[in-house]
Image (tube, rainbow, N blue to C red):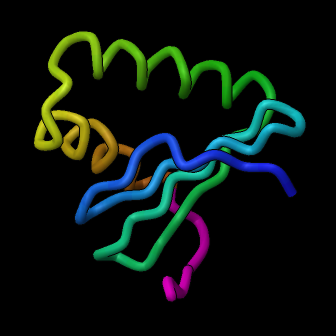
């Protein structure tokens, strides 16, 4: 499975899967994640780019990603 790590902070990972336009957001602190595919992935990408263009600081991007917390629909184990 081909993927790229697009973002990595103390709080979050954002992964891009090169098949089917997929993005995965992992909240390291909550141990939760969500996956976007297709149109939802396109919308997430546009929003993420907008957040970075507004303010590329780690704090701002982490704040943007923390707003996705309600969408986190599975538990993860990071190792």
Give the quadrant of the N terminus.
bottom right
* Whole-percent x, y for residue 66 in the image: 28, 50
The residue sitting at 61% across, 51% down in the picture is 24
Residue 28 sits above or below residue 20 on the image: below
Q: Quadrant of residue 12?
A: bottom left
Q: Quadrant of residue 59?
A: top left
* Whole-percent x, y for residue 42 in the image: 66, 20
The residue sitting at 20% across, 25% down in the picture is 56
* Whole-percent x, y for residue 40 in the image: 68, 29
Residue 11 sits above or below residue 60 on the image: below
For residue 15, side relative to residue 22 (left or right): left
Q: Nearer the viewer, residue 15 or 69?
A: 15
Q: Which residues are magenta?
A: 72-79
For residue 3, side relative to residue 27 (left or right): right
Q: Quadrant of residue 57?
A: top left
For residue 69, side relative to residue 79 (left or right): left
Q: Is residue 42 magenta?
A: no
Residue 12 sits above or below residue 37 on the image: below
* Whole-percent x, y for residue 58 in the image: 17, 41
């Amino acid at each position: 499975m081909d993927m790229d790590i697009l973002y990595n902070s103390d709080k979050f990972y954002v992964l891009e899967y090169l098949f089917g336009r997929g993005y995965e957001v992992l909240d390291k602190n909550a141990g939760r994640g969500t996956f976007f595919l297709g149109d939802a992935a396109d919308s997430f990408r546009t929003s993420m780019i907008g957040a970075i263009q507004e303010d590329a600081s780690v704090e701002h991007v982490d704040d943007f990603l923390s707003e996705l917390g309600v969408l986190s629909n599975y538990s993860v184990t990071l190792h």
